[in-house]
Amino acid sequence: MKRTVFAVLFTFISILPAFSQNKIKPILSTCNFGSKTELWGSLGVGILNFQADVMYIYGKLYVTPLMPDSINHKIPTLTDAYLYPLFNQFKKNKGEIIPGYSGDIFLVLNISGQPVQVYKQLAIEMRPFTDMLSFELEGVKHPGKVRILIKDNNQLLQINSIKPSFLGLVGTLADVNKNMDSQKMPLIEVELNEITSWKGTGNIPFQDFLKLKELVAKVHAQNKKISIRNCPSNQMVADVILTSKVDFLNTPEGITVAGYMEVVK
């Protein structure tokens, strides 16, 4: 039985790049994964960008927003659920997560307390995966396939003196007019209700759609990506994301929403 399960998993991983290469979806998955197979499954439907809650617990980084009730918890580590499966793809595909895909892949971390301790531990846990990551050391930039970002600027200020520097920042709508360096802030995240009162039912008001497209164009002119969060998971929203050229829809239902989306042109 174990041999059969392994064979099926191996076959799935082997065909993953060919299946995904031409089907990249504008989705940033915000669901905390519980195993490496969940990330591989998302890659299999064209989801390349991820968000995870991380917490420092007893010397390791775990994927959770809350302290577990028991020391015998089954919460996965960040390495097991995200870093290892991404690196597996990177090594297997000779330096690419998905063959032929040249864009950045984002891993956004929500740090649940102790940002300095989390960063120090992250630096330790990153060492086996440095070839895959974008970072800067002593003024020298190492361009990688995966960029690690955080959302809290105050946390970044607490840890930005620690080397190597491999964290970027997710900006907000208020940061669009600040025109911060895209190397430091490569992604802008906006709430849907900051743009429109549309709830995802029926057509989005035309003026709001134009407002969204103008915002997308402004962000893209700064060489940044834009993501929209707190959207309903339905076909109407997926169509708006695709036609407006928004880079990512943030959703915990990534695989479901991927089914609503056509191939990104």
Image (cartoon, helix red, strand yellow):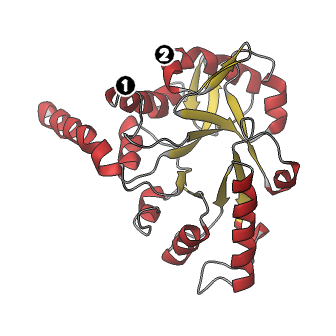
User: Which residue is at a point 64% across and 24% down the rendered structure image?
Assistant: 135
Task: Describe residue 252's horizontal placement relative to residue 90 as left or right.
Answer: right
The image position of residue 238, as x and y in percent, is: 52, 70
Crowding at mark 1 (Cα within 10 Å: few <14, some 14-19, many 20+) = some
Relative depth, front residue between 111 and 204: 204
Identify the residue at image location x=46%, y=61%: 264
Residue 69 visible? The answer is no
Q: Secondary structure at mark 1?
A: helix
The amino acid at mark 2 is Pro
Which secondary structure lies at badge 2? Answer: helix
Q: Which mark is residue 34?
A: none
Q: Amino acid at mark 1?
A: Lys
Residue 21 in view here: yes
Residue visible at 79% across and 23% down in the picture: 160
Which x, y percent locates residue 57?
62, 23
Circle 1 sits on which residue?
91
Q: Residues within 10 Å of mark 2 (few under 14, many from 20)?
A: few
Residue 99 locus on image (x, y percent): 37, 39
> Which of the labelled discs sits on residue 128, or is there none?
2
Q: Quadrant of the N terminus?
A: top left
- Mark 2 or 1: in front is 1
For residue 186, which quarter of the picture? top right
40 w.r.t. 205: above or below = above
Residue at horizontal 76%, vertical 60%?
218
